[in-house]
Amino acid sequence: MIGAIEAGGTKFVCAVGYPDGTIVDRTAFPTTTPEETLAKVEEFFSKHPVEKIGVGAFGPINLRTNSENYGAIENTPKIPWRHYPLLEELKKRFNLPVAINTDVAVACLGEYEYGIGKDVSSCLYITVGTGIGAGLVQDGNPFQGKNHSEMGHILLRKHPDDRFEGICPSHGACLEGLASGPAIEARHGRKGAELAEEDHVWEIEAYYLAQAILNYFVVLSPEKIILGGGVMKQEKLYPMIRKQFMELLNGYIEVENVDELIVAPGLDDDQGVKGCIALAVKE
Ligand code: ADP
Ligand code: ZN
């Protein structure tokens, strides 16, 4: 049996399953202090013994393999977790092989192995939620530079009707600062779910996401671009994004079928835990 830990900033999900991605049991609890949270993780796995564990963690995390702090959470606003050596602690507590990557890289891996990306050799998974992040998997491996990428923090052209300055503490009007769930709420004064009928809200949102996807597409050329996260529960965004993307691309690169290029996740909300299983299997 393989273990999965989706270590999110607001909640942890622990699960056990098989290498084929079948999940047998799971639990979820809020992320509090590292000590309290890891005690609950230990409790779950003491009832469900596993051979190895895969972790998809909120970031930023240290993924520099030659660093002595490999697998530690880095400069997060969640003070108790800042510089917390998550990987080292898990290895110490379980004495098992533990593999770690970012939550988005792991979600991408889940879709690549078991979901909508299972027939392609490269895919990009973008989450549009409390933050915006993306992970790229190529030939079964999450892309890795010196550290993980931060694709939510790219700079974009402003929509001509958008006076909003953006909420990213570092860049103001980067993609995350303009198009994350909290950015929508800050711009319009209400949560995204309450703005469903306001067409201009989604027109602006699609404008930014289409630009971001154009940038990722020309740089990375992924075969599938999967859009997930809470904001994408507004399903009307998919056709709006595809249309704006094709307009921006303007024939420069041939796209046979944009409906198959820019897609919704195939695993509902399970790409994270299933991706953890896939990550552990590779370890
Ligand atoms: P997280 O990013 O924290 O893992 P989610 O992916 O669920 O969590 O994203 C949460 C964000 O998505 C919030 O900002 C919330 O307002 C927004 N959101 C959730 N549901 C909807 C919806 N139906 N329509 C628009 N925005 C939504
Ligand atoms: Zn930013």
Image (cartoon, rainbow, N blue to C red):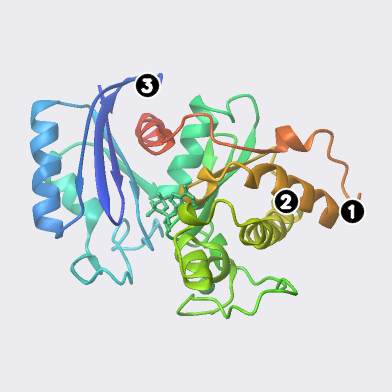
Residue depth check, mark 1 versus mark 3: number of the one nearer the observer: 1
Between residue 8 and residue 149, name the one nearer to us. 8
Between residue 178 and residue 278, name the one nearer to us. 178
- Tell me, for residue 62, which label it has, or none: none
Q: Position of residue 238 (x, y in %)?
A: 66, 43
> Disc 2 marks which residue?
217
| Residue drawn at 20 percent across, 36 percent down | 96
Q: Position of residue 111 (x, y in %)?
A: 51, 33
Question: In the structure shown, which secondary structural element does the residue marked by tag 3 occupy?
Answer: loop
| Residue drawn at 51 percent across, 43 percent down | 233
- The answer to whether mark 1 is within 8 Å of ligand 2 is no
* Distance (Cα) linking label 2 and label 1: 13 Å
Inspect the image, locate mark 2, and give the three-letter code of the amino acid beneath it: Phe
> Disc 3 marks which residue?
19
189 left or right, relative to 2: right
Circle nearer the N terminus (1, 3): 3
Between residue 50 and residue 270, name the one nearer to us. 270
For the residues labelled 1 and 3, say whether their Cβ atoms are less than 8 Å apart.
no
86 left or right, relative to 204: left
Q: Position of residue 94 (x, y in %)?
A: 14, 39
* Distance (Cα) linking label 1 and label 3: 42 Å
- Tell me, for residue 250, which label it has, or none: 1
